[in-house]
Image: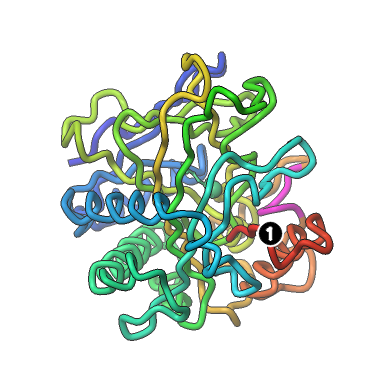
Amino acid sequence: MTQSVMGSINNGGGAIQLPVIDVSNFGAEVGKQMLDAATNFGFLYISTTGTGFTEELVNRHFQLSQKLFALPDAEKEAYRIDHSNQGWVGMQAEILDPKSQRTGDFKQGFNMGEFRDGKPQKPLPSVLEERLEDLAKFEAKCQQLCGRILDLLALGLEVEEPGFFSSRHTQPSGCTVRLLHYPAIPDESDYQPEVDIRAGAHSDYGSITLLFQRPCQPGLEIRTSDNTWAPVPVIPDGYTVSTTFPPILVNIGDLLSYWTNGMLKSTVHRVVFPRDAKRGGEDRYSIVYFCHPGDDTQLVPVPSRLVAEHTLDEGAQVGHGGGATSERAITAQEHLLNRLQATYEFRGSSASGGGVKV
Ligand SMILES: O=C(O)CCC(=O)C(=O)O
Ligand SMILES: [Fe+2]
């Protein structure tokens, strides 16, 4: 079953109605629906049916995240993020949109890099270490779902090699599970609702991103083609699968944009405080999976008639500016390092203490 596959943008700054896709139906028709959503919006929902995720597994992850972020900062400090891009990012340590923000993002995060044979690559705080099996299971399911989405996109794009994208998602890679906590703003803070933000405007650096959200904790907005911000509801209108287990939000990252010469959109998004809240509103928790191809993957255009026929609009950018088709093809790792480097440069000498972003 596929729900409300049409999708539409309300350009008056109203909520955006994105398509909901059920990936349990694998085939050309779903591939085309996925491609349409990725081309028009760069964002879509995946119904939890047929994803392999259960409400219990996702709930346990959010409980774990709450437990982790409730620890005193001094304890999390021992796991502070470093150049491996793994570990804890403290409150306001990351600035996703340095050009526009006056202070850091009102959030804290914890990045876990890819698991190899069920094992993380860096030591984890004991609250996480105690639940390694669950963490590995969650990460593996994220990978599987991303593989299916990538295969459907390849089908939609009529790529000559059907597993083109998924087969390039090898290890080592920049794949990351990121736990996020956006606290409510305490009354005594100097936060200014007109300028301060939970996560500044950015596009994601990988191939695709999965976002798990909690009912009643909205805040994500995407930038539409006419430069307005459209809120994305956690549970879209007409979604009948569950009121307690939201669909998984998927967005296209920079690498798929390069791979398709901008045909798929790596859409800019941000997280804002609830507009109707008196101050900072309630806490928000989210879990993000950033999917990346193997480090050595060259970002050359995929062999697809549709991509070859695609021409960029005047002045349009591919990925995060530039474009693999117009310059020397860069690798997935080079792209990731470039984007992390930009953050380090901004932080200058405090780089080792700053938060970075996949
Ligand atoms: O927390 C969210 O809803 C989105 C976070 C996000 O866009 C990111 O971390 O890249
Ligand atoms: Fe993002």
The count of marks equals 1
Residue 195 in which image quadrant: top right
Residue 89 at what x, y percent from top left? 57, 57
In the image, 146 versus 67, the foreground residue is 67
Residue name at image x 19 percent, y 31 percent:
243
Residue 277 at what x, y percent from top left? 47, 17
Name the residue carrying label 1. Answer: 354
Crowding at dot 1, Cα within 10 Å, few <14 / some 14-19 / many 20+, comes out as many
Residue name at image x 67 percent, y 20 percent:
194
Q: Quadrant of the C terminus?
A: bottom right
- Against 178, residue 46 (above or below) is above
Q: Residue 196 vs residue 56: left or right?
A: right
Check the image and name the residue furthest to the bottom.
Answer: 117
- Main secondary structure along the magenta-highlighted residues: loop
State the colouring used for the structure image: rainbow
Q: Quadrant of the N terminus?
A: top left
Q: Residue 316 vs residue 139: left or right?
A: right
Residue 85 at what x, y percent from top left? 59, 68
Q: Residue 1 vs residue 38: left or right?
A: left
- Against 29, residue 292 (above or below) is below
Badge 1 amino acid: Gly
- Against 270, residue 302 (above or below) is below
Q: Residue 126 vs residue 10: left or right?
A: left
In the image, 43 versus 278, the foreground residue is 278
Q: Is residue 210 visible?
A: no
Q: Is residue 63 magenta?
A: no
Residue name at image x 40 percent, y 27 percent:
17
Q: Secondary structure at mark 1?
A: loop
Residue 291 at what x, y percent from top left? 46, 64
Magenta span covers which residues?
316-321
Q: Is residue 212 visible?
A: yes
